[in-house]
Amino acid sequence: MRKLPDVSNTEDSAKDRTNSARGVAGNSAMHDSAWKHVRGEARYIDDLPEPEGLLHAAVGQSSHAHANIKSMDLSAVRAYPGVVAVLTVDDVPGHIDIGPVFPGDPVLANGLVEHVGQPLFAVAATSLRAARQAARLAKVEYEPLDHAVTVHDALKKQIFVRPDHTQQRGDYEKALNEAPHRLQGEINVGGQEHFYLEGQACLVEPTEDAGVHVHTSSQHPSEVQTLVAEVLNLPIHEVTVEVRRMGGGFGGKETQAAPLACVAALLARHTGRAVKYRLARYDDMVQTGKRHDFYNTYDLGFDDDGVLQGADIMVAGRCGYSPDLSDAIVDRAMFHSDNAYSLGPARVVGHRCKTHTVSNTAFRGFGGPQGMMTIEMAMDDIARHLNLDPLDVRKRNLYRPGRDSTHYGQVVEQHVLGDLIEKLEASADYRERREEIKRFNSDNPVLKRGISLTPVKFGISFTVQHLNQAGALVHIYTDGSILVNHGGTEMGQGLYIKVAQVVAAAFQVDLDKIKVTSTRTDKVPNTSPTAASSGSDLNGMAALDACEKIKANLTEYAAKKFNVAESEVRFANNQVIAGEQAVDWAEFVQGAYTARIPLFSSGYYQTPKIHYDRNTGSGRPFYYYANGAACSEVIVDTLTGEYRILRTDILHDVGQSLNPAIDIGQIEGAFVQGAGWLTTEELVYADDGRLLSNGPATYKIPAVSDAPLDFRVELLENNPNKEATVFRSKAVGEPPFMLGMAVWSALRDAIASIADYRHSTPLDTPATPERVLGAITRTQQWVENRAAELSTEQAAQKAQEGEPA
């Protein structure tokens, strides 16, 4: 990793950029829980002190993918020692359906099951072991029904969780027909298990007013609050939801933490006792959704230089049995099916395929990565078809002035990628290494190396407009310490420390004066999920808004107290400076309190400019785009299909970084997770809908040995966001995940070298050694077939010329 850049504070309203206060926004600062993580002191749900009389929850699970429930005998469950309560759907006092956006998710099965592992009933017992053991004793009789497991099954049966959607710009058919060259292709893009370190968990305590207090590991406290209230048939204000931190989320805890909280709340309300519900790893993998796997196709027209003239793209996601967030996820796959390239006249169609598997859900990138895979595959295919360097084809197709309108009508206004790729191409020595790799491959019949440089252009904002809002509270106490609360949740990504740095920068005080407290629905209401890479954008701006309101009052007070103009009052170096006079921050705050100046405020922010019309498939769904590029080199053993990542260079655009150390950590982690998605992490389902890769023994996340041997990460310098984000920063949570595509593309490059880079063999993901070996075998067969064809052609030509064959 290279040296962190020195990024200065860029607060628009602060002309004085002395940045002398320690740890303010723009500087690297340690994660606020780093030492707690290392020492094991960070409290997660299972670490909270257990209330007296605590019960433990478990659920009975369906053993069928699709069936009617004919009968359910729970007498043995109720009789098991330690069992206090057993509830079915008939015991739910309020709403049964807890679908987060669209209906389709019963809190407990209601006569029909639609995936293996679907909860049938809930058990509360005096120990976790007793609850789990008892849940297995149910006698359930089923009437099996026809089921679909794969995207291809669903497309064949034409079953979907939501209607299809189309985005179209221009006459794509005419463009395809008139293009000098035309290629078609298809790819199966695998799903991904979240595999967070802390599984799904919650602790629900009844309150004295018939409500409940919910401790949950959730990215969306307000959704948990609303659904729990609806299930219990209570007004929302009777439910308080609190989140201090999660042990990882990645989208898996955006909607799918709520069912656990609802079940635990039902049991708590029924028994009058606190209930903890924590999933074992196996149950977590079976009961909760994953990244959607996709089946995508393309039909592209292009000229002799590889420049796209038109496109027809289809993306089809495996949604599982219910809509969950699939409508928006497939939308985002459609939005990002261009990645960084101007498609020309284009049509993009998205299918939301229903399968009788667990309902898939949000995962870092939210469909964007799956959409990008199609066009990145096509860039390599076009290059091989024309015998060009894939990087040249990519660069020629980048959005640029004159070719800057997407297939959904948004204009790309900030053309960052051209310069960014040029810088990375030079710093990574791409051209020199490309030639050296060709020499290596020509001299080595078994080992083959490959290299690829791929870009990322990722839209930032929730594509559902009303989610793009946030609130915050800022309190200043009389000793000068500051408490902050906002609607964002902390899952290890460093949101709390970034918001604290924003507040520190606003008042120009040391970071250690700021404390961010647990996210709670009774402090900031109606919060949006911490997702879509918008946590810092939304909550940072809301906190800054609260600070500016407080500062306005303090500035007016200082001007009057010291008899200066308000323009002569400034905040710097833990002081308030009024003209020639400087007062220590804590002393000034104490004086302001004595003078009855408000030292607290709420803040609010809503993202401007964004809109999207689904009827026309056009609009501006994104406030701005985050950009990056990765250059990865791999080495492949053609006898086994095994490979290693030799080197990866990343240059990423985070605007004016709020915290370079946190941002670089996010980029490193996202890249490795993205590479894991495309290489080692394989979800395997049996024909009957059972998940076979249901634990760490059968599902391989990347290990240290899977990371690049040489790993270099840099932030793009001197490129503040042109949109008015918090201190001109850019989102960093999701965009670098897609940099992992460079590894997959490099594997294809190594395989293509077997055919002297003249053939582009498809490679579905994850590109496990087995799949890589299969692609190698097909490429070798193509070489043999091509040699036979050339031999036949030469013999025929000689015969025509009268020469002996």
Image (spheres, rainbow, N blue to C red):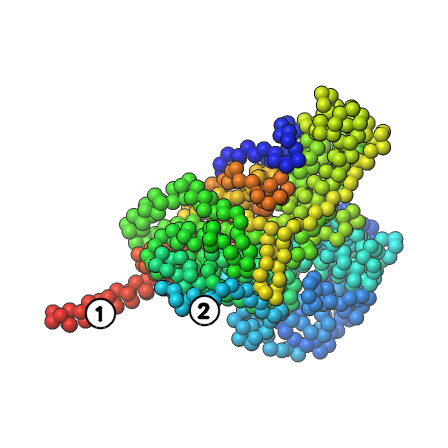
Instruction: Name the residue nearer the viewer: 552 or 131.
Output: 552
Q: Which mark is residue 546?
A: none
Tell me: 493 left or right of 338: right
Distance, label 1 to label 2, CA atoms, is: 37 Å
Q: Tell me the amino acid under the disc marked 2.
A: Glu
Q: Could you tell me which residue is drawn at 42 percent across and 61 percent down?
A: 309
**Element marked by disc 2:** helix
Q: Tell me the amino acid under the disc marked 1.
A: Thr
Q: Which residue is denoted by mark 1 in the rendering? A: 792
Quarter in which the C terminus is drawn: bottom left
Few, some or many residues within 10 Å of mark 2 (<14, 14–19, 20+): some
Q: Which mark is residue 173?
A: 2
Position of residue 605 relative to residue 82, above or below, is: above
Residue 101, image quadrant: bottom right
Q: What x and y, as percent, mark residue 88?
A: 77, 68
Residue 103, image quadrant: bottom right
Q: What x and y, as percent, mark residue 619?
A: 59, 58
Tell me: 531 left or right of 433: right
Tell me: 310 left or right of 18: left
| Mark closer to the observer (1, 2) | 2
Q: What x and y, as percent, mark residue 272?
A: 85, 58
Q: Could you tell me which residue is drawn at 85 percent across and 30 percent down?
A: 595
